[in-house]
Image: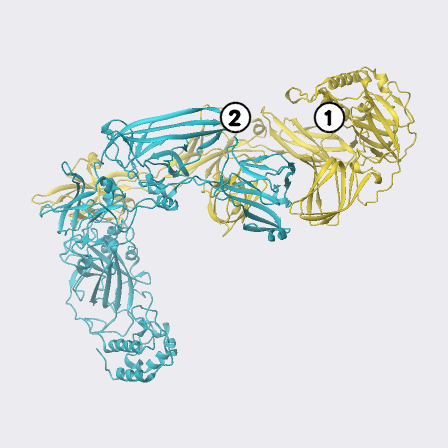
Chain colours: A cyan, B yellow
């Protein structure tokens, strides 16, 4: 028997050898390749099996009687040694993983296989009674693994079912002994037992036994499943049913499973020894075979892994693609990754919970070529979130058997980072001996402390746009003042709330409240006099009308982030026909890849100066997978030039597809209305940018100071004076909505009644006279 | 029972030898010193009887038919109830049980020991009659019923009758008696002669001397079995051997036996035979009415069933069929069959006796299995039958069955194929060496061909929740839920998986699938309602294939080349071919698949292009724009190498850009991000190449352009 070792994290394999140059790693499993799973006589196999099989009528049983691991340096048995039958696609495999602690752990580097792997689950089995002639029997009779022994003096009966289409026999053997055994008589324990019975309706109604399911078969016959209690498992029961049994459903009882803690070896010299024997129980009329002993012994060496790289699950600094394939959007330079914002702690998460068993502390060092290094000795600790990399099947298996799933280890650097390119080094400083490096990779530390400052733009008006004839710079327009009616409405709502007559939720936009609904409420009746304040708002298009949708060649480039996002960015600019350079001799997209000095927002326009997209540009790449953008636009007056006031119209809510540039330092913001990519109208644009440190599917970033909302947010509000005003929907095409901005609140709901009109009347008078404005 | 003689009678026959014809048989398993007990002398007894019309208005036949009413034992009305089918144990085995049934519809099973010997469907208010050589137990599949006027008939223990001896038959003389003496037992012209009697005597001697249970080699009958066949073939043989007797007026003086007071006219009588030495128990009583025995009926036309022409193991064609008849009356034991078989152009007519009867078939029915070597696959059979009883009577001839062509039951495997290739226009299939496949005799006789088919569809599959599961014989009936697949019948012959259960779909008549789980005697994995069934069409379903070529089955070449034009593939394509035999209007099964790989053509080298650098990004990568001089519809990839390497070295020294493989925008424009060296003080030269890539990752040579990066 040739023994090997398998590193459950990387899948690396060794042939066990007493050659120190072929040392295995401390957390490797020793693989014992059996021909078939064997019975455990040591108590060390955590998922033991019965280990017998029927071969030519003989019941062959192999039993593992000794499993020892000896530390040859300390001349002591290694305590807590366990072994596990590895799971694979289709069920258990005959590979015994010594030092393994769950059947699925070895599949960690093969998550696709792990998804389809399973431990052998004994299925429910159905034993029928065939379709032969009717028969009586009074001696024990075998049906597969079942033996029916009629009660003394009574017949067991096999009779054709009374429903011809069933075409099978049924058993009647009241009180008979039902036992389960292999061909050699070896008992089989079952932990679930059901009788599928055929009975008349009146009989079924009189049944006292637990019945799981019933089916009416016609002719007054029922089919029912009757559960037979076998406690924790039994190899024989007395049939508790006197009627007709169509079949018996049962399940082999699995042996109990343990979930011990994992043993990680220390560097050193070891010996694995195994011993057991195989026996053959003869069928009736033959003699048992003589036991055949077998054994194996193998010495091997253990050394620390030369690098921690296989154990790293992710790093919040550097290129996360170094630690495993990460398909999809990532336009950064391989090996560098996105610049890390300094308000986030560098975290290196491992994919196992026992790195601290090998290295209790690690030295983290940010090595800057042109600045002082940042060094910190940190403990290897379990991650506080309790996360584990184990395949789901392994987690399920452990928890299903009463075990716990230890969180993976991690190291966290708390010292402040300095902007610039650097290397992150992980080293081990042993108690004796020189420090040795375990891993390192390049990182880029951002000049920005956080994403909010990275995305922040102080501008209040779009001043630069690009058209087919090159860039255009416009003077900034002045910020608009809020109209009086808007402030009054806010005051009114506050007044209503203070009056405690109605309940409003101001922060949640709702569908516009139809005037009729509003009128019908008490509040509506009371508020009616304020209608004149601003007049009614016109209805709005719910999809881009006319020539507002983006051309198909541009619209097809919008969409979720993927590996082709950079291409789509360049193609959008190319197909839009804009020139980025004022130099007519320069290429149209000259300097498209060049970073900007500071964050800015610009516009990509068509020939008529109508914005096709906004271009949010920053000095550094940003992980746009974490950025979520919402855009609203308030319409303005007049229809050209600098806006001077807000139009009395509903605010447009647009969804935005960011289309990052080829290095991720900027992104085109493509607006959609009702799913259709659209040109942007004139107006006041509000961009709400949300940065998710814990975006699903990405490494979780850890802020130095916890974020109250769990995320960063920045709002950019600016005037967009280019292009045309969004058209008003013709009156015939839709209804009207109230002019007061109360459509942004939930419909009033009477909490208590009747109202006391006194304060409201005063309030309304006040509003009518223009008071309380602020 | 096993040690008792068994007696049968037909009643008064007017034809020679006239009288009441009797015959009896020796018990199969009665032995003394390991040999069959053969009495030295059989005593034939007769008792007068007053047979009256049976007061139960039910139709009787078999042993119950002639029994006098007084021979039935009355048990009155018997009510039975309980959760289990009712069992009625009788004191000793009886030959018939009858009752008027009252209860829910049910089945009654009559058992002799552990074997079920008779079954009848019961309906409320109807008479039931169960008859067998021995019945000791009844089991009724209901929880409550009443057996009204329950009666049993025990022919071995009838009420006392005034028997008198009418004959003493000397069986011991069989071994030595000359034929003339033996012939005195048969008062008519015998068909046997001296020589055949001599053979029969030898067989008798061998059977009597043979140990009980002796077996002959290779399935041949033992002497005892052979003797029973000879005795059963004709009543005359039984009479000559002292195992039959005619109680009538034609007898002359006996040469071997003694008889007296034989009948001269029919009377109501009871007969019994016994062993003079008492080593065997007396026979059952048989009642004979005082009237001529009823004539055998005109036989209806038989049917030709299960006809098939097959290829035998020797490679020769064989035809097999069964001639089945019915309506010959309960007294018949077989039929004389006149059969005409037409093979190819000629036909032959043959007459033979058929005595086969299936275990559960009623009296008056029977069949004979026929198996003949034939020279042609075209076989037509017709037959007529005449009833035969066990007393050498033969009924009138009946009409013949219509000529019935026998179906061909043949599923020839096609020639094995080793491989397949195709250039998109011509396909070539090859046979593995040695190329010695030849059609079998049946295919050759039918002028069969080999068809070649190409797969044009993928096996359909669907998932559906399981609603109910019930076993039905060797199959599982699985009721599924949800929307039916477009063509449920396409899944017949496919596979179904429900958890651990895997089986073949015999039939899918939505929403029920009949599943063959082929479990033998052991258990099968349970299919639990609520589980999901995964159903897939057989990959060899002929509906997935179209024929693309056909050749005579004889003389198939090593390489089968045929036109099979196909559109050019856009990606790697795997074509699957199979062979199939076509013969006599039938199709054999599809053979194993061979596959031909088709790759899309290697794309052409992209057109020349111009390079524009568009700037350097945050990571100091250069963004470039490439403009092709001519549009290209291919997928393209941009690579670059430092310097200006020779064209042959470019692919080895170059690395791809970040953009990967894609189409050029408008067929002309490519953008990419390349990690080009950043010149500082002197210009740097790089070579940029564009390669066309097809969907199968087939790649063209590079079109290259040398480009200079100006110093900063």
Q: Give the quadrant of residue B560.
A: top left
Chain ID for label 2?
B
Mark 1 and 2 residues: CB-CB less than 8 Å, in contact? no
- Residue found farthest to the left: B681
Q: Is residue A205 above or below residue B279?
A: below
Of residues B248 and A251, which is closer to you in this image? A251
Element under disc 1: loop
Label at residue B28: 1
Q: Locate residue B251, reporting x and y percent.
A: 90, 24
Q: Is residue A474 above or below residue B44?
A: below
Q: Which of the two labelled residues, at mark 1 and mark 2, occupies the earlier sequence position?
A: 1
Q: Does A571 sit left or right of A133 as displayed?
A: left
Q: Is residue A757 visible?
A: yes
The CA span between labels 1 and 2 is 52 Å
Of residues B445 and B221, which is closer to you in this image? B221
Q: Is residue B363 visible?
A: no
Q: Give the quadrant of residue B220.
A: top right
Chain ID for label 1?
B
Q: Locate residue B531, reporting x and y percent.
A: 48, 47
Total numbered badges shown on the rendered structure: 2
Q: Residues within 10 Å of mark 2 (few under 14, many from 20)?
A: some
x 37%, y 38%: residue? A46
Q: Does A340 sit left or right of A245 as displayed?
A: left
Q: Locate residue A329, reporting x and y percent.
A: 26, 50
Q: Residues within 10 Å of mark 1 (few under 14, many from 20)?
A: some
Q: Comparing marks 1 and 2, which lies closer to the viewer?
A: 1
Q: Is residue A174 above or below residue B432?
A: below
Residue corresponding to mark 2: B438
Same chain assignment for discs 1 and 2: yes
Q: Does B134 sit left or right of A117 as displayed?
A: right
Element under disc 2: loop
Q: Locate residue A314, reporting x and y percent.
A: 24, 46
């Amino acid at each position: 028997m040739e023994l090997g070792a398998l590193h459950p994290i990387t899948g690396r394999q060794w042939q066990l050898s007493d050659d120190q140059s072929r040392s295995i790693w401390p957390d490797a499993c020793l693989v014992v390749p059996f021909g078939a799973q064997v019975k455990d006589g040591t108590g060390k196999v955590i998922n033991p099996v019965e280990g017998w099989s029927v071969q030519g009528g003989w019941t062959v049983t192999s039993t593992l009687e000794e499993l020892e691991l000896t530390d040859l340096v300390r001349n002591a048995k290694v305590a807590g040694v366990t072994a596990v039958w590895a799971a694979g696609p289709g069920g258990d495999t005959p590979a015994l993983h010594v030092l393994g602690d769950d059947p699925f752990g070895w599949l960690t580097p093969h998550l696709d296989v792990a998804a389809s792997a399973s431990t052998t689950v004994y299925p429910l089995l159905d034993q029928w009674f065939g379709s032969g002639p009717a028969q009586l029997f009074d001696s024990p009779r075998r049906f597969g693994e079942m033996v029916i022994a009629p009660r003394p003096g009574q017949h067991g009966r096999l009779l054709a079912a009374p429903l011809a289409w069933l075409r099978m026999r049924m058993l009647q053997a009241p009180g008979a002994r039902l036992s389960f055994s292999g061909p050699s008589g070896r008992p089989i324990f079952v932990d679930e037992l059901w009788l599928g019975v055929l009975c008349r309706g009146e009989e079924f109604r009189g049944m006292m036994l637990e019945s799981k399911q019933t089916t009416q078969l016609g002719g007054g016959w029922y089919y029912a499943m009757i559960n037979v209690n076998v406690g924790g498992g039994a190899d024989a029961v007395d049939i508790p049913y006197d009627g007709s049994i169509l079949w018996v459903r049962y399940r082999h009882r699995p042996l109990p499973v343990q979930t011990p803690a994992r043993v990680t070896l220390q560097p050193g010299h070891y010996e694995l020894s195994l011993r057991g024997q195989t026996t053959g129980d003869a069928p009736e009329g033959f003699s048992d075979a003589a036991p055949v002993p077998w054994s194996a012994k193998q010495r091997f060496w253990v050394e620390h892994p030369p690098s921690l790289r296989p154990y790293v699950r992710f790093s919040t600094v550097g290129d996360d693609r170094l630690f495993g394939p990460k398909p999809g959007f990532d336009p950064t330079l391989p090996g560098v990754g996105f610049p890390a914002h300094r308000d986030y702690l560098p975290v290196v998460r491992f994919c196992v919970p026992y790195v601290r068993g090998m290295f209790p502390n690690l030295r983290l060092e940010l090595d800057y070529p042109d600045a002082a290094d940042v060094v910190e000795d940190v403990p290897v600790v379990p991650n506080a979130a309790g996360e584990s990399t184990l395949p789901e099947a392994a987690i399920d298996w452990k928890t299903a058997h009463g075990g716990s799933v230890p969180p993976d280890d991690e190291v966290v650097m708390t010292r402040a980072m300095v902007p610039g390119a650097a290397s992150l080094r992980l080293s081990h400083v042993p108690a004796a001996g020189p420090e040795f490096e375990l891993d390192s990779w390049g990182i880029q530390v951002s000049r920005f402390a956080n994403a909010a400052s990275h995305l922040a733009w102080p501008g209040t008006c779009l001043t630069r746009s690009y058209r087919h004839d090159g860039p255009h710079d416009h003077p900034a327009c002045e910020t608009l003042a809020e109209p009086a009616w808007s402030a009054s409405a806010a005051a009114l709502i506050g007044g209503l709330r203070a009056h405690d007559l109605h309940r409003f939720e101001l922060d949640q936009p709702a569908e516009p409240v139809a005037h009729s609904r509003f009128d019908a409420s008490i509040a509506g009746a009371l508020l009616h006099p304020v209608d004149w304040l601003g007049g009614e708002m016109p209805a709005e298009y719910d999809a881009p009308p006319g020539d507002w949708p983006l051309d198909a060649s541009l619209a097809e480039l919008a969409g979720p982030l993927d590996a082709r996002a950079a291409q789509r960015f360049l193609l959008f600019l190319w197909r839009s026909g804009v020139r980025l350079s004022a130099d007519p001799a320069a290429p149209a997209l000259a300097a498209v890849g060049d970073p900007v000095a500071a964050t800015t927002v610009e516009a990509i326009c068509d020939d008529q100066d109508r914005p096709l997209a906004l271009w949010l540009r920053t000095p550094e790449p940003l992980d746009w997978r974490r950025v979520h953008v919402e855009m609203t636009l308030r319409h303005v007056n007049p229809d050209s030039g600098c806006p001077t006031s807000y139009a009395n119209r509903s605010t447009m809510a647009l969804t935005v597809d960011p289309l990052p540039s080829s290095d991720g330092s900027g992104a085109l913001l493509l607006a959609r209305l009702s799913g259709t990519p659209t040109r942007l109208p004139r107006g006041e644009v509000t961009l709400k940018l949300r940065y998710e440190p814990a975006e699903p599917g990405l490494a979780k970033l850890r802020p130095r100071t916890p974020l109250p909302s769990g995320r960063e947010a920045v709002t950019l509000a600016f005037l967009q004076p280019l292009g045309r005003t969004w058209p008003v929907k013709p009156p015939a095409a839709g209804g009207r909505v109230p002019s007061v901005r109360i459509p942004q609140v939930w419909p009033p709901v009477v909490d208590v009644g009747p109202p006391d009109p006194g304060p409201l009347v005063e309030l309304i008078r006040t509003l009518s006279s223009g008071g309380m404005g602020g | 029972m096993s040690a008792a003689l068994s007696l049968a009678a037909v009643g008064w026959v007017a034809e020679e030898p006239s009288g009441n014809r009797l015959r009896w048989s020796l018990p199969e398993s009665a032995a003394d010193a390991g040999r069959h007990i053969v009495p030295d002398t059989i005593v034939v007894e007769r008792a007068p009887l007053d047979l009256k019309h049976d007061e139960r208005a039910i139709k009787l036949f078999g042993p119950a038919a002639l029994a006098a009413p007084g021979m039935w034992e009355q048990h009155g009305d018997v009510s039975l109830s309980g959760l289990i089918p009712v069992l009625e144990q009788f004191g000793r085995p009886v030959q018939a049980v009858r009752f008027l049934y009252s209860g829910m519809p049910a089945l009654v099973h009559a058992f002799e020991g552990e074997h079920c010997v008779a079954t009848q469907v019961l309906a409320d208010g109807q008479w039931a009659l169960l008859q067998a050589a021995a019945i000791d137990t009844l089991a009724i599949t209901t929880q409550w019923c009443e057996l009204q006027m329950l009666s049993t008939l025990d022919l071995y223990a009838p009420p006392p009758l005034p028997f008198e001896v009418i004959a003493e038959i000397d069986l011991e003389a069989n071994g030595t008696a000359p034929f003339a003496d033996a012939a005195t037992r048969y008062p008519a012209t015998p068909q046997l002669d001296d020589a055949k009697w001599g053979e029969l005597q030898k067989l008798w001697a061998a059977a009597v001397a043979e140990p009980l249970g002796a077996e002959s080699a290779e399935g041949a009958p033992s002497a005892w079995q052979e003797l029973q066949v000879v005795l059963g073939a004709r009543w005359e043989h039984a009479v000559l051997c002292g195992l039959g007797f005619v109680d009538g007026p034609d007898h002359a003086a006996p040469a071997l036996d003694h008889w007296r007071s034989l009948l001269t006219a029919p009377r109501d009588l009871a007969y019994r035979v016994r062993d003079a030495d008492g080593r065997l128990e007396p026979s059952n009583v048989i009642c004979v009415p005082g009237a001529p025995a009823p004539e055998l009926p005109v036989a209806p036309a038989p049917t030709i069933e299960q006809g098939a022409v097959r290829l035998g193991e020797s490679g020769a064609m064989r035809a097999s069929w069964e001639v089945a008849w019915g309506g010959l009356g309960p007294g018949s034991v077989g039929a004389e069959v006149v059969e005409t078989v037409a093979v190819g152009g000629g036909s032959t007519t043959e007459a033979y006796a058929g005595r086969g009867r299936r275990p559960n078939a009623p009296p008056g029915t029977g069949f004979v299995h026929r198996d003949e070597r034939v020279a042609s696959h075209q076989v037509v059979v017709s037959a007529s039958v005449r009833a035969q009883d066990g007393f050498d009577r033969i009924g009138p001839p009946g009409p013949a069955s219509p000529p019935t062509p026998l179906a061909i039951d043949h599923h020839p495997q096609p020639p094995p194929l080793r491989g397949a290739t195709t250039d998109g226009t011509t396909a070539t299939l090859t046979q593995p060496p040695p190329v010695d496949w030849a059609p079998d005799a049946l295919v050759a006789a039918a002028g069969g061909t080999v068809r070649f088919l190409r797969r044009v569809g993928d096996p359909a599959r669907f998932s559906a929740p399981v609603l109910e599961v019930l076993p039905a014989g060797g199959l599982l009936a699985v009721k599924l839920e949800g929307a039916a697949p477009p063509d449920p019948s396409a899944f017949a012959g496919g596979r179904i998986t429900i958890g651990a259960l895997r089986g073949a779909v015999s039939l899918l008549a939505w929403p029920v699938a009949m599943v063959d789980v082929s479990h033998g005697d052991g258990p099968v994995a349970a299919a639990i309602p609520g589980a999901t069934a995964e159903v897939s069409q057989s990959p060899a379903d002929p509906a997935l294939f179209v024929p693309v070529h056909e050749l005579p089955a004889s003389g198939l070449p090593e390489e089968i080349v045929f036109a099979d034009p196909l559109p050019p593939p856009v990606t790697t394509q795997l074509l699957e071919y199979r062979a199939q035999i076509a013969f006599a209007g039938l199709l054999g099964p599809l053979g194993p698949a061979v596959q031909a790989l088709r790759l899309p053509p290697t794309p052409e080298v992209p057109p020349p292009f111009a390079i524009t650098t568009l700037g350097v990004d945050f990571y100091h990568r250069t963004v470039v724009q490439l403009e092709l001089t001519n549009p290209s519809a291919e997928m393209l990839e941009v690579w670059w190498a430092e310097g200006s390497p020779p064209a042959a070295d470019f692919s080895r020294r170059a690395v791809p850009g970040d953009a990967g493989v894609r189409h050029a925008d408008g067929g002309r424009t490519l953008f990419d991000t390349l990690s080009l060296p950043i010149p500082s003080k002197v210009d740097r030269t790089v070579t940029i190449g564009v390669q066309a890539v097809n969907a199968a990752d087939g790649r063209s040579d590079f079109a290259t352009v040398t480009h200079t990066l100006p110093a900063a």
